[in-house]
Image (spheres, rainbow, N blue to C red):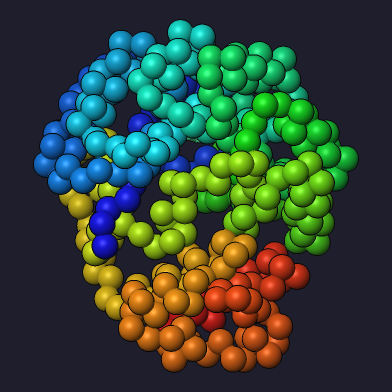
Amino acid sequence: MSVKSCYIHIPFCNKICSYCDFAKVNYNKLYIDAYLDSLSHEIDLYYKSEILDTLYIGGGTPSGLEIDELNKLFKILKTIKLNKTYEFTFECNIESLTEEKLKLLYNNGVNRLSIGIQTLNLKFLKFLNRNHNKESVLNIINLANTIGFNNINVDLIYAIPGETISDLEEDLKFLTSLPITHISTYSLMIEPHTKLYIDNIKNIDQDLDYKMYKFICNYLKNKGFNHYEISNFSKKHNSKHNLTYWNNEFYYGFGLSSSGFINNRYTNTFNLNKYLEKKYDRKIEEIDIKTNMENEMILGLRKIEGVDKSKFKLKYGKEISEVFNIKKLIEEKKLIEENDFIKINPKYIYLSNQILCEFLL
Ligand code: SF4
């Protein structure tokens, strides 16, 4: 199987969000040059010059880099070869985007923006420690669209303590009025080591969480968005990069804390000092056939269309039903067999995590 994609992590953020448990550090100009030098070294060391379908620059806040730093990053990225129909995504936040940066991204081949909006409600933005507002969101997204970006994702967070369905509706109404093509949704989870956790904030009630999820699915469907993965909705363009993950295909991961999957899974060091010294300390997790088949199902069933039975047979030489006890799940109507696919019954999508656990051998 060939390598399809590459993820690159830029861990610097200008401001730390109260819910964040990603690998990130406060932006400090002193680190950036050394970080980019190490990234360049890592790519030279491991990248085997394959022509890839997708490149994804995530973080952290990659758009928080200054112009000279972005120029240096793009110079490094020239090494990575992309095919003619490539998807090149750059993660951004509203506060750090300017016209000059947007043009720089566009002129360097970025053709998809993923913008962390989370919410437009000023009270909840403060709670999440985010600093934009409706006007700045509107201005930046319209500007990006005018510059030529016609594939824009926004991230939406819901289930914020105190949020009502009508607050959520306000956010959805505003987001769907923008020239965007994709929405990724996240139910707010209070994770250990975050400010919210330290402040003893609790997750919202499960019933309300479920109602909000259903509300989002219906609202976005009515607005012409295709629900193609548990938490993802698109108009025209599904995320090719994330489909690499959900299809259990090979990808590189470069940068602090990044993971890749090429025969086995590897994860880089989480220690910034080590990374700056070009010590990647890759931890390797061996993926045997059993684990690979589990992953194929657990990741693949996140897609609304499900897992292609013929492709599974071709890849592993066995039918899905020979490996997993899907008969029981089909009888319970949790799974549906349709055409050549096995998928989760849309009625049970919200409970998908419980169903996916059944695929651990
Ligand atoms: S911008 Fe993203 S990575 Fe940075 S603190 Fe906020 S959630 Fe975390």
- Which residue does the image show at 64% across and 31% down from the upper left? 180
Q: Position of residue 20 (x, y in %)?
A: 52, 40
- Which residue does the image show at 62% across and 55% down from the upper left? 228
Q: Nearer the viewer, residue 92 or 79?
A: 79
Quadrant hosting residue 244 = bottom left
Confirm whether residue 181 shows in the render. yes
Tell me if 119 is positioned left or right of 19 in this view.
right
Q: Position of residue 119 (x, y in %)?
A: 70, 33
Q: Nearer the viewer, residue 301 or 200?
A: 301
Quarter placement of the N terminus = bottom left
Quarter placement of the C terminus = bottom left
Q: Position of residue 174 (x, y in %)?
A: 77, 29
- Which residue does the image show at 66% across and 20% down from the upper left? 137
Vertical side of 223 occupied by 208: above or below: below
Quadrant hosting residue 207 = bottom right
Confirm whether residue 16 shows in the render. no
